Amino acid sequence: MNSITYDSVRKLFLLQTARMSYAFTISSNGKLVHVYWGAKVPDSGCFDGMLAGLQADTAVGGVNAGSRPYEYRTQDPFVYGDIALLPIFADGVRNARLVYDHHDISEHALVVSLRDEHYALAVDLHYDLFGDLDLISRHAVIRNNGDTAVTLDVIRSATVNLPPRQDYRITHFAGNWGAELGRNQCMLTQAQFLLENHRGTCAAHQQQPFIALDPRGESTQNCGEVFFAALCWSGNFKLCVEKSYYGDVSISAGVNDFDCQVDLPAAGTFTTPALAIGFSDTGFDRISEILYDWQFDWISPRPKAHDVRPIIYNSWYPYEFDVREDNILGLIDKAAHIGAELFVIDDGWMPKRVNEKAGLGDWVVDPQRFPRGFTPITEACHQRGLLFGLWVEPEMVNPDSDLYRAHPDWVIADPTRPRSEQRRQLVLDLSRDDIRDWAIDWLDKLIDDYQLDYLKWDMNRYLSENGPKRDLSIRFIQNLYAIWAHLNERHPKVLFENCASGGGRADFGMVPYADRINRSDNARPSDVMILHEGFTTLFVPKTAGGAGNISSDASTPLPFRIHLGMTGSMSVGINLLKATDETIEQLRQATAAFKLVRADLQNAYVYHLASATEKPYAVWQYLRRDRKTFGLFAFAHGMRHWDRNLPRFRMRGLIADAIYCAPDGSRHSGAELMNVGIAITLKGDYDSSFTFYKEG
Ligand code: DGJ
């Protein structure tokens, strides 16, 4: 059971989850000082030996004293770590000196209010629990209680302190367009290790705002302690891990202060994005379990309404911009035949949108290529039992568009400099509320008019200049979330895909709003093996999307591509109007087989028993969350002759005394499968297999 308590005798806040404890205290001069984060301890008495030192007046100390682990670090005297807050007051003073004021505890939430010792500035530190999940979501609310404006120069969500005096290994995910979510690891030295991004419109094409730290780098997939932090923010962010000479290690994370300041008017407030922090006592797999449970049960949209994701046929890979009524109607027919359940017209359906040079911003159907509008398309889909979806890119505009000709002042630009184009497009100033409302209006109308069941929201360029407004990068993302929140609320039955040139916005800021995440534009099977491992470390597999997860890359055998397509939210990228009868039949059989196990695979934890980054094969176990069924995928790539002698693979997480039935009818106890393991045969490159076991 989880609990949040304040022990007034010890002056100790203690947050308890299933397997984690987190504690902090109030020092004698009113500072909030961190005490403990790690494996669960029974009660607040466990910290008695530490409290006197931590509660002593933090202002006292010589040059050799180091500094206390502050719970929300500001520029107190002789504090030199990365700070969480830097206000600039009207008189020019530039620091916050925060002390405890009061607190409020409810069943799953703690708010500790701090106030500046001199200025009318307050900071509420929020700690939210999610049942007994080993995860705490932290954010801060900065309140200007004075009658003059305060400028916020640095505004982080939290400072988090780790158990000190040990070496840590850092694990983080970084990448690029087409190479999202690559895993990186290194040991932390006495330095600041900085993950940051200032591309403005998305983060994950550079750095995923996530970090994990394991003591001494000794933890494995299923052993050892791992601490992690995930920032729920899709724009410019900063995540700094720092180790001092004394071995103190802390994380500070929040919106990036790069080229950004927020003016807080009198009585104004600023709410930071959340930083979710969590703890695993059984290695990296457990991190995924915690993050999955958080998504499945707490933060994902409408978790009960859409248990599985429909199989998608998307026009992008087969036809790119060349979408017309005739080829689309032909594809719909074939898509229904192979068992797809949702048809998506991707980019190219608007007037003049025959390539990337024109049309973005004019969100009406092209009368030349769709002379009867979408009516015959919608009807064809619905008559064949297919859902219908459309692609949009609401944040962008081509200079060659009616929208731009009418509103050249709507884009983000420096008044004296050329407007830099990327993919021939400019970025609308979504930080403006009138542009936010314009987007909401046309999106609502589009969904209603075309009876959309699905909307794929794309975003294909980064910011290159921020214009004159200093808080643009923050307001842009806040308004982006406001639109997504509106769409979810106003269209509860519509499914939404979060795409940003592939996986540019695969992050926890977007998770609450999207049913599907475009993992990458790169659908090449050997790359997808690696992309998917990064993706499923953090995100639930049923959201793992892409325009064609069953790729059109014919250099890889179709069964291999089909098996890969089964590992996420299935979509077909093969041109069905050009495919052979044999391919069509293989796809038809594949979707039918997939539907039988889809609910199990899409509501499962994923364990990487062998990683494609380390071996010439990947073996992934998909364990349904109630642990009663599992699917086992194996994929070979780059295998040499002797690599065919694969080891037996020991399953994880099964119920030891349950009996699991294999596809050949043989029966095995969970204990056997977890200890003796399962033999897998891969005959060489691009061989693959899938087997499914169920209890009973
Ligand atoms: C990038 C997306 O990731 C693709 O799936 C596709 O929608 C294109 N944009 C369309 O321009």
Image: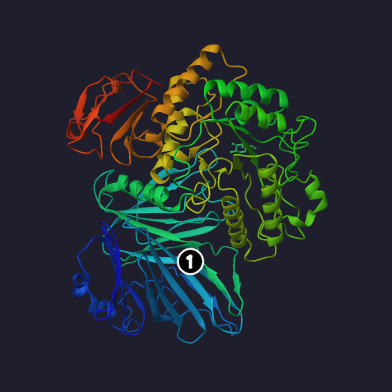
Number of dots carrying numbers: 1
Give x and y (percent) for residue 320: 66, 30
The disc labelled 1 sits on which kind of residue? Arg
Which of the 4 image quadrants contains residue 625?
top left
Q: Is residue 601 above or below residue 301?
A: above
Can residue 414 be seen? yes
Give x and y (percent) for residue 123: 47, 75
Applied colour scheme: rainbow
Report if the beta carbon of the residue with label 1 is closer than 8 angstroms to ligand 1. no
Q: Is residue 55 above or below residue 653?
A: below
Name the residue at the top extreme.
581
507 or 645, which lies in front? 507
Give x and y (percent) for residue 323: 70, 29
Can residue 616 be seen? no
> Does dot 1 land on a helix, a strand or a loop?
strand
Q: Residue at x 57, y 24 (%)?
A: 336
Left or right of 644 in this view: 292: right
Q: Is residue 418 above or below residue 498?
A: below
> Where does ligand 1 appear, by image quarter?
top right
Q: Residue at x 72, y 32 (%)?
A: 375
Left or right of 343 in this view: 245: left
Name the residue at the bottom extreme.
118
145 or 472, which lies in front? 145
Quadrant occupied by the C terminus = top left
Neighbours of disc 1 within 10 Å: few (<14), some (14-19), many (20+): many
Q: Which residue is mark 1?
A: 156
Quadrant occupied by the N terminus = bottom left
Give x and y (percent) for residue 579: 58, 16
